[in-house]
Every structure is written in structure tokens, then in C-alpha cells.
Amino acid sequence: MSRELKRICVYLGSNPGNNPAYVSAAESVGRELAGRGIGLVYGGSSTGLMGRLADACLAAGGEAIGVIPKRLVEKEIAHQGLTESHVVNSMHERKQLMADFSDAFITLPGGIGTLEEFFEVLTWSQIGYHAKPCGLLDVNGYYTCLTEHMDRMVAEGFLLPDHRRMVLTSPDPGELIDLFAEYDPPRVDKWIEMKKGL
């Protein structure tokens, strides 16, 4: 049975990156969400890929909800045209509220903050705090080396294959959302020694 996706959280860079494909992908995600009637939840900035994502979603008639800490309101220039804006006190509050609002998580190209957000919400899923799908939009192979490293984590005994499969990946926003709708979370413990019976 398909899961209901009312809102999807998107993690991505507050810079535009050096490849126009990244901007194009952010805009495509915004339009895809709006076209499907799925609300956008993101970090609330008007800059970089974040701003282009929100602008595209809003221009297509979609809902865009931003969550941004007070300290970053000026640095990232908080978007002034969103459906809803939430200013919080810390990054911890930001990430928790974004997760609470959302039914799934898409990660586009970005820097260390983007990766930190992705891995935190993935870890929450791994240890059972939620069962929401998590995906990488692999624009121009941006995340190929990351997925290859996760394969190495499995090979080296630090990640269970079932948990590796939690990371859904596609270069196409529509295909990734379709994968989310059919996602069936793993039902295994995180601890590999327990699986080995040690």
C-alpha cells in the first residue's frame, strides 16, 4: 500500500554550487512537489539552492514552509515569501521541527551542513525513531562517492545491508518520490553483533 506524503523535507545547499545542473535540479524538485500537491519543508533561506527550490515551488502554486534559527536569519537571508516561516533558537530545534513536519526526506547537493542533516535523520530511522523514507537526489553523480562509501561500510561490517537499502537514490525527483510512496522500512536491529549472535 502506498504511503501518504503530505509534506517532504528537502536538505540542500545555501550556495548555488558551480554547476547549473544543481540549480535546475532544485527548481525541478520545487515544481514536482507543487505539481503533486506535496508541501515543501526546508531550511527557510532565500539564498543558493534553498532559495531557488522555494521560489520554484511557490511559483508553481505549492506550499513552502521554512524553518530557520535566529542566528542564520541574516546570514542566510530568510525567505520573506513563504507559506509559513518558523524562526527557532537552535539548529537542534530546526532539524527536529523540520522532521516533525515531514513525511519523507530528500537530500540534494550541498555541503557539510546538508550531509549532517541527511545522516542525522537517516540515523534516527536506523535506530527506530521514525520510519520515514530518506533519499538522495544524485544530480550529475554528486552522491556517487557517498553511496559507494556506504557500500564499503556494509563490506567492512559497520552497516547492515537492510539499513544500506534505506537510502533511496535517483537522479530524477519524480522517480525518487515514487520510491518514497512504496517504501517499506527494514525491521532489523542496528547492532551487527546481535545479528551475528555474539
Image (cartoon, rainbow, N blue to C red):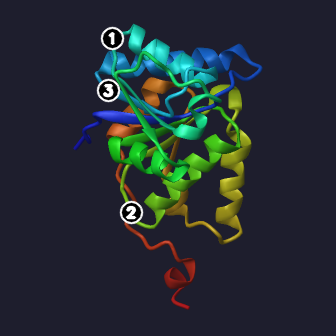
Q: SS of the residue at dot 3?
A: loop
Viewer-proximal residue among 69 and 190: 69
What residue appears at the point 47 percent right and 20 percent down from the top-left corner? 54
- Residue furthest to the right: 18
What residue appears at the point 56 percent right and 91 percent down from the top-left corner? 198
Q: Which class describes the residues within 10 Å of circle 3: few (<14), some (14-19), or many (20+)?
A: many
The percent coordinates of residue 91 (x first, y second) are: 54, 48
Q: Is residue 194 above or below residue 184?
A: below
Mark 2 and mark 3 lie on one chain; the one further toward the N terminus is 3
Q: Is residue 177 above or below residue 165?
A: above
Q: SS of the residue at dot 2?
A: loop
Q: Which residue is mark 3?
A: 38
Task: Tell whether label 3 touches label 1 (CB within 8 Å).
Answer: no
The quarter holding residue 24 reads top right
Which residue type carries mark 1?
Gly
Viewer-proximal residue among 72 and 116: 72
Q: Which residue is mark 2?
A: 129
Q: SS of the residue at dot 1?
A: loop
What residue appears at the point 62 percent right and 17 percent down from the top-left corner? 23
Q: Is residue 171 above or below residue 122?
A: above
- Residue furthest to the top: 59
Question: What whole-number distance in Å separates the C-alpha atoms at marks 1 and 2?
Answer: 32 Å
Task: Tell whether label 2 touches label 1 (CB within 8 Å).
Answer: no
The percent coordinates of residue 92 (x first, y second) are: 51, 53
The quarter holding residue 5 reads top left
Question: What whole-number distance in Å separates the C-alpha atoms at marks 1 and 3?
Answer: 11 Å
Viewer-proximal residue among 92 and 146: 92
The percent coordinates of residue 96 (x first, y second) are: 43, 51
The quarter holding residue 113 reads top right
Question: What whole-number distance in Å separates the C-alpha atoms at marks 2 and 3?
Answer: 23 Å
Which residue type carries mark 2?
Tyr
Q: Which residue is mark 1?
A: 61
